[in-house]
Amino acid sequence: MKICTYFLFLFVAVFLTACNHDQSQKSGQATTVGIETATVQSQQKTDYLEIPAHVMADPSRVVKIFPPLSGRIFALRVLPGQEVQKGQVIAMLQSGEIAQARADFEKAKIEVARADRALQRGKLLLQHEVLSQADYYELEATDQVSHSEVERTRQRIHELGFSEDGTSDEVAIRAPIAGVVLDIGTATGELQRSLDNATTIATIANLDSVWVAGDAFERDLATLQNAHSVEVLIPAYPGLTIPGRIANVSDAIDPNSHTLKLRIVLPNPEHKLKTDMFATVRIARTVRIVFIVPATAVLHEGDKTYVFVAGASGKYDRRPVTVGATSERGSTKNVEILSGLNNGDKVVTVGGALLRPASGD
């Protein structure tokens, strides 16, 4: 008898539970087990134009050093990447060309002495009316030419980096500016020519300021012209954003790639930016109002996209939405909602798929 009473009570409890669940479904209410919601607020989202670029030295601050005379490099005192000061010796060169320059200088001095003596003799002959005035002018001109030749040969010796009174055939090649050695074009023991087919000894660049050069497509020309400021991102330094301004947009389009060259000049006092580094130029375009929700809140059915929004009466409304870009932050994947939501809506972020039978669709 007790067993029959127990089973009768269990049957009644199960029947009442089923009736209550069915009544809940008919009234439009859904269970909250496994359901999580979040209140959404609108956010401003800026669209950016991102242009691939690279860092390069300012061409006006780059100097290629060529040998001042032919000869042999017997000491190279710098390496690529090394910083040098203005006037620092970067190489030593030994040349027989200075011997020729000194010989020309000595020959010019002999000619000056000879011309001076001839002019003095001409003055005496002119005074005694033995020499005509025209012949005297000719001697005077010859004397002036000989003096000019002495100055020319003396200046040539100085240009080669020597003194006319010296005897050495070695010349120190110095850095004309302070900067960083970008490239070495010679080696110790190599012969150099000072005129035709000369090889650069070194290339030095001042990197206190650098250029960021990018290639933009012609369809983005309007954005470039309206840009007052930009942001430069350097992949080598994650999280680093450098503000800048567009200094120049090329007037010529590359016929092969149909891109425009743009240039941003950036200060680089710590030399953190290296030549040929990759960079990205980011330019703000438009500002949109969007809602950001987790990707788990967005449901798809055919060509329709929707979310569930908690109503005031405890019901969950199915709300069609228009989605935008998808982004990731850590392990969380978020989706932009462009339309269909309002500030303060409680969106189902987890368990939305459980509400589909209760939606009436």
Image (spheres, grey):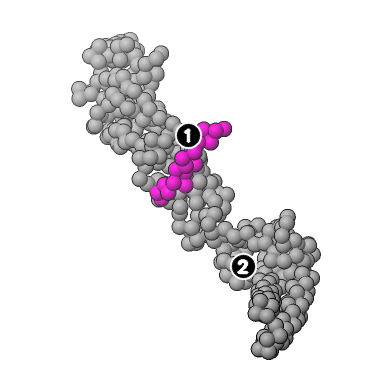
Q: Is residue 9 above or below residue 165?
A: above
What's the residue at 62%, 63% (across, down)?
A: 82
207 vs 290, nearest the viewer: 207
Residue beneath label 1, please? Answer: 217
Q: Residues within 10 Å of mark 2 (few under 14, many from 20)?
A: many
x, y (%) of residue 144?
65, 77
What's the residue at 36%, 37% (across, down)?
A: 285
Amino acid type indicated by mark 2: Ala
Q: Main secondary structure of the magenta part?
A: strand
Residue beneath label 2, please? Answer: 175
Q: Is residue 10 above or below residue 136?
A: above
Q: Residue furthest left?
A: 313
For the magenta stretch, what is the residue range? 244-263
Q: Identify the image quadrant of the C terminus.
A: top left
Badge 2 or badge 1: first in the primary sequence: 2
240 vs 127, nearest the viewer: 127
| Residue 278 in the figure: left or right of residue 320 | right
| Residue 227 in the figure: left or right of residue 165 | left
Q: Quadrant of residue 341?
A: top left
